[in-house]
Amino acid sequence: MAAILIDGRAVAAKWKGDLALQAAELSADGTEPHLAVVLVGDNAASQVYVRNKENACRKAGIRSTVIRLAEDCDQEQLENTVRSLNDDAGVHGILVQLPLPRHLDEAAVLRLIDPNKDVDGFHAMNSGRLMNGQKGFIPCTPLGVMKLLEAYDIPVSGKHAVVIGRSNIVGKPMAMLLLAADATVTVCHSKTENLKELVRQADIVVAAVGRAAFVTADMIKPGAVVIDVGINRVDGAIVGDVDPAAAEAAGYLTPVPGGVGQMTIAMLLHNTLEAVREYGR
Ligand code: GUN
């Protein structure tokens, strides 16, 4: 039986509509939400992602400013840019688009972002808050996954969730969120032995490895919920980490494109409005 496809576009559209209403209310109350994006260099994928963020902000009535720095900009210039955004009371959210050119110290830059403007949720203060079950900014992609599960009334409590990938951006925060929702969580990665056996035990699989068709149909327990976070370019097409043939085994599957990716931007808008409500007025 073919899986039910989770329509991330439709869920994200509903979120964006609600967020636009919230943004309009905040503006009417005298605070126009404002997201600042720092883009260093000319990575083609990053240019596209940043343009999508700008467009989504405009449609939601959120002001966005993109600060473009040259590929060869130095650490001091980048850090001074972040400092001035931290000090600017008219900026509520700061996002430094990753990856940075290799000569720059990414960890040092992320550490510098005011945790109360860290709408990506990458600052150690926010990952610590997530780890400790405290309120804070949650990275947009894993937060979007949780909202998709909620939108489809997919139960998480007591279920075995297997997260494939251990990045700071997706895998680790994803595991923390699933754990906070009372799942039993296994985190797999490139060194995991018996990956197939482990994934086959999962009621919920989250694939965030960054390799096309890494998760195959034979790894999926019949009826499992399969969330594909991958965005891989193969011969000019965008494909996920899950082989589309997995749809024959899965109960639910997020398509790529049209699944999780749409939710990431919606959650960025959500976090930006949270920044206004919590710290911005
Ligand atoms: N590069 C790829 N995904 C992301 C993201 O969610 N945030 C930032 N800042 N950079 C990224």
Image (cartoon, rainbow, N blue to C red):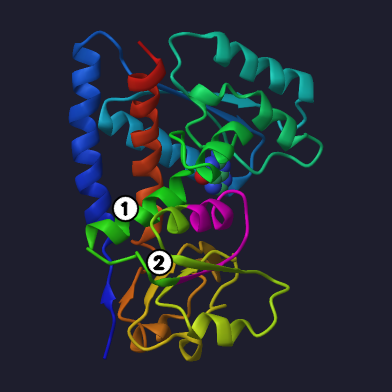
Q: Residue at x 53, y 42 (%)?
A: 132
Location of the C terminus by quadrant is top left
| Left or right of 49 in this view: 31 | left
Q: Residues within 10 Å of mark 1 (few under 14, many from 20)?
A: some
Q: Residues within 10 Å of mark 2 (few under 14, many from 20)?
A: many
Rendering quadrant holding ligand 1: top right
User: Any mark on residue 228, and which?
Assistant: none
The amino acid type found where label 2 is placed reads Val
Q: Nearer the viewer, mark 2 or mark 1?
A: 1
Vertically, is 20 above or below 151? above
The x and y percentages for residue 137 are: 46, 35
Q: Out of 197 and 132, give the one closest to the viewer.
A: 132
Q: Is residue 94 magenta?
A: no
Callout count? 2
Location of the N terminus by quadrant is bottom left
Q: Out of 3 and 62, give the one closest to the viewer.
A: 3
Residue 220 figure quarter = bottom left
| Left or right of 105 in this view: 273 | left
The x and y percentages for residue 110 are: 65, 32
Q: Out of 103 and 220, give the one closest to the viewer.
A: 220
Q: Out of 213 and 155, give the one closest to the viewer.
A: 155
Q: Residue at x 29, y 81 (%)?
A: 3
User: Any mark on residue 147, and which?
Assistant: 1
User: Any mark on residue 256, and which?
Assistant: 2
Region rendered in magenta = 161-176
Task: Give me the C-alpha separation between circle 2 and circle 1.
Answer: 17 Å
Earlier sequence position, callout 2 versus callout 1: 1
| Left or right of 170 in this view: 183 | left
Q: Is residue 162 magenta?
A: yes
The amino acid type found where label 1 is placed reads Lys
